[in-house]
């Protein structure tokens, strides 16, 4: 990189579950790398998305929603979110414009008080509220922290997202381009593929199964120039969940596979043959060895 004025840095996105962090990241990057669902606690790992222009590169870290943990997996998710705050040049704290400030927001604000990097307040989902109702929401947070800036945005519609990016780039230090211009995530393709499968499970099974699901990619092989063969196992905690996942005559599993395959083909730019199995692994969310084998980082357990 020859440009001595090139800007680059790392930015963490934190907030309660389901405030729109993954939607925001996908909007900024321009394609789906983080899974989206109306079910809370969808994002379980720190997902890195890379935003690159001719003048700058920002590596965004989408953290799991911070919540009161109820299992080892829950502990992992909160530790993962908070550890991101010590690794970055700026923090985006995202809240939901349709909800009042609550205990979960206060929990995060207390932890943000120790962060040395500048903290931005993002009030998301402004497309869902009347403009007159926005000011009271902003006032709830105005004095909570010395914000670097406050941005009301719609991650879904894109309102004010470009303004935010301009403001962030201005604050980034001069530095190198860490990743190639066409790279949008630092996660291996296997990880993103497993996340896309997990997203379809969230979408199709709703509240019946989601928090008890992990997806393990058993193999991913390029069969020829245009075809990729993927074998994946869906892990659930109870036999009843396995029944829901398979569906009558295998109908649910087929639907999950069909929807996931379309996104995976878009990601890989190849035709995909996707084979899915379902396995019962009782209480996997409370077993450290299983959490590690399903891709959750040892450092955060």
Image (cartoon, grey):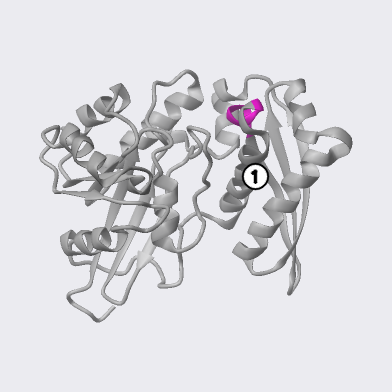
Q: Residue 91: image x %, image y %?
A: 25, 46
Q: Residue 77: image x %, image y %?
A: 43, 31
Q: Nearer the viewer, residue 7 or 109?
A: 109
Q: Is residue 122 magenta?
A: no
Reply above or below: 12 against 221: above
Segment tinted magenta in the rendering: 208-213
Q: Is residue 210 magenta?
A: yes
Reply above or below: 104 against 232: above
- Quarter of the rendering occupied by the C terminus: top left
| Side of 71 relative to 220 (left or right) | left
Location of residue 280 (image quadrant): top right
Q: Nearer the viewer, residue 156 or 165?
A: 156
Residue at left offset 46%, top offset 59%: 185
Q: Is any atom of residue 231 visible in this view?
A: no
Reply above or below: 49 against 278: below
Furthest-right residue in this view: 249
Q: Residue 286: image x %, image y %?
A: 55, 20
Q: Nearer the viewer, residue 94 or 63?
A: 94
Residue at left offset 60%, top offset 36%: 293
Residue at left offset 72%, top offset 21%: 238
Type of secondary structure dominating the magenta stretch? helix
- Quarter of the rendering occupied by the N terminus: bottom left
Reply above or below: 211 against 130: above
Q: Residue 118: image x %, image y %?
A: 16, 47
SS label for mark 1 = helix
Residue tagged by mark 1? Answer: 200
């Amino acid at each position: 990189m020859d440009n001595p004025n090139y800007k680059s840095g790392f930015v963490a996105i934190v907030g309660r579950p389901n405030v729109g962090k993954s939607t925001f990241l996908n909007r900024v990057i321009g394609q789906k790398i983080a899974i989206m669902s109306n079910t809370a606690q969808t994002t379980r790992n720190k997902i890195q998305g890379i935003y690159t222009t001719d003048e700058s590169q920002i590596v965004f870290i989408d953290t799991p929603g911070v919540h009161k943990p109820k299992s080892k997996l829950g502990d992992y998710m909160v530790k993962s979110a908070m550890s991101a705050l010590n690794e970055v040049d700026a923090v985006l704290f995202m809240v939901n414009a349709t909800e009042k400030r609550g205990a979960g927001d206060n929990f995060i604000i207390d932890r943000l008080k120790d962060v040395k990097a500048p903290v931005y307040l993002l009030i998301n989902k402004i497309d869902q509220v009347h403009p007159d109702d926005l000011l009271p929401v902003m006032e709830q947070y105005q004095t909570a922290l010395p914000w670097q800036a406050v941005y009301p945005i719609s991650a879904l519609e894109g309102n004010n997202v470009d303004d935010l990016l301009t403001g962030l780039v201005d604050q980034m230090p001069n530095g190198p381009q860490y990743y190639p211009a066409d790279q949008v995530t630092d996660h291996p393709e296997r990880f993103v593929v497993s996340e896309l499968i997990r997203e379809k499970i969230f979408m199709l099974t709703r509240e019946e199964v989601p928090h008890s699901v992990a997806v393990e990619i058993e193999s991913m092989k390029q069969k020829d120039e245009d075809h990729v063969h993927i074998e994946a196992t869906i892990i659930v905690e109870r036999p009843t969940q396995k029944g829901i996942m398979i569906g009558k005559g295998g109908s649910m599993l087929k639907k999950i596979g069909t929807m996931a395959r379309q996104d995976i083909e878009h990601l890989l730019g190849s035709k995909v043959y996707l084979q899915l199995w379902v396995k019962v692994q009782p209480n996997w969310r409370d077993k450290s060895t299983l959490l590690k084998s399903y891709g959750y980082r040892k450092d955060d357990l």
